[in-house]
Amino acid sequence: MTGTLVLAGTPIGDVADAPPRLATELAAADLIAAEDTRRLRRLTQALDVQPTGRVVSYFEGNEAARTPELADALAGGARVLLVTDAGMPSVSDPGYRLVAAAVERGIKVTAVPGPSAVLTALAVSGLPVDRFCFEGFPPRKAGERLSRLREVADERRTLVYFEAPHRLDDTLAAMAEVFGADRRAAVCRELTKTYEEVKRGPLGELAPWAAEGVRGEITVVVEGAPDTGPADLGPDELVRRVQVREDAGERRKEAIAAVAADAGLPKREVFDAVVAAKNAARAGSSEGK
């Protein structure tokens, strides 16, 4: 009989937010894989629980190498508990590889639900929460960051990001450039902790505020793009949207179809706009010779 992989959500700040089942699982697990064993020790002390199973580290640096070992333990019948520093494992944290390995072997995977920085930030942001998408950490390099942001420039759902405090000002400035300085956002800092702060405002105002220096764990919530109807989309805007998708790696045919679907227009209308722009560019180039 195979074992069970348990993904355990841990507090994102206040240890009192720990789900009651967490202590039970910590005490009963045959093997605990922890992103930081020192933080795990502090957590078990705060919960007044003494683990009886073996504890191993499982973090970004050894995740790939340790996954087969943990998968073998699961296949042998062990109950393996995976905990990360805060929140749910595998969500911008170690865990995906182990879940995939367990699923591939037909091993049961379950979870202890717990606090979530994504949902907490959404709830307190004051922005629409009926539809949203989680984008994780933006790329560190400026060019890659801009490219990734352009991919979702027309996304109408609310966007949620994680970001390191020392990169926050650059990221907010890039968002203001791509999404527009007037796009509303909320920077949620140190959620559920002593110095919790939620700074709300347009991106154009949040970027200079962050440049003054921000500390702590950061979650950024950004308002989605306005719902622009077909009448508001001229040929230049249609061409721009196609170009954004092409820059992100889509083939032109698929990009045209996607833009047409989003705009509620016939594909032929978008195609004609792209062809006209291409011909205009060629004509301008010929005249310049």
Image (tube, rainbow, N blue to C red):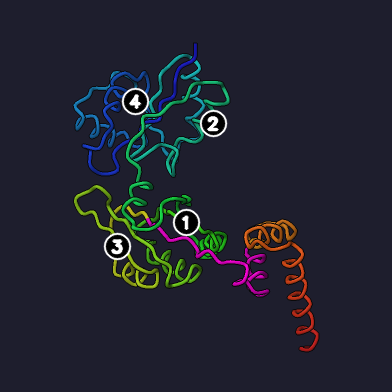
Residue shown at the point (49%, 57%) measured from the top left: 139
Question: Residue 125, image x and y in percent?
Answer: 34, 56
- Quarter of the figure that contains the C terminus: bottom right
Please provide the residue range marked out in magenta: 220-244
How far apart marks 1 and 3 lie (CA) works out to: 19 Å
How far apart marks 2 and 3 lie (CA) works out to: 37 Å
Label 4 neighbour load within 10 Å: few <14, some 14-19, many 20+ = some
- Sequence-wise, the earlier of marks 4 and 1 is 4
- Sequence-wise, the earlier of marks 2 and 1 is 2
Label 2 neighbour load within 10 Å: few <14, some 14-19, many 20+ = some
Label 1 neighbour load within 10 Å: few <14, some 14-19, many 20+ = some
Q: Is residue 236 above or below residue 96?
A: below
Q: Amino acid at mark 4?
A: Val
Q: Are marks 4 and 3 in contact (CB under 8 Å)?
A: no
Q: Name the residue beneath numbered marker 2.
A: 100
Q: Name the residue beneath numbered marker 3.
A: 199
Q: Amino acid at mark 1?
A: Pro
Rendered image quadrant of residue 260: bottom right
Q: Is residue 258 above or below residue 44?
A: below
Label 3 neighbour load within 10 Å: few <14, some 14-19, many 20+ = some
Residue shown at the point (76%, 84%) measured from the top left: 284
Give the secondary structure at mark 1: loop
Closer to the eye: label 4 or 3? 3
Give the secondary structure at mark 2: helix
Question: Residue 111, image x and y in percent?
Answer: 40, 29
Of residues 17 and 182, the one nearer the viewer is 182
Q: Name the residue beneath numbered marker 1.
A: 138
Q: Name the residue beneath numbered marker 4.
A: 55
How far apart marks 2 and 1 lie (CA) works out to: 24 Å
Q: Are marks 1 and 3 in contact (CB under 8 Å)?
A: no
Q: Amino acid at mark 3?
A: Lys
How far apart marks 4 and 1 lie (CA) works out to: 32 Å
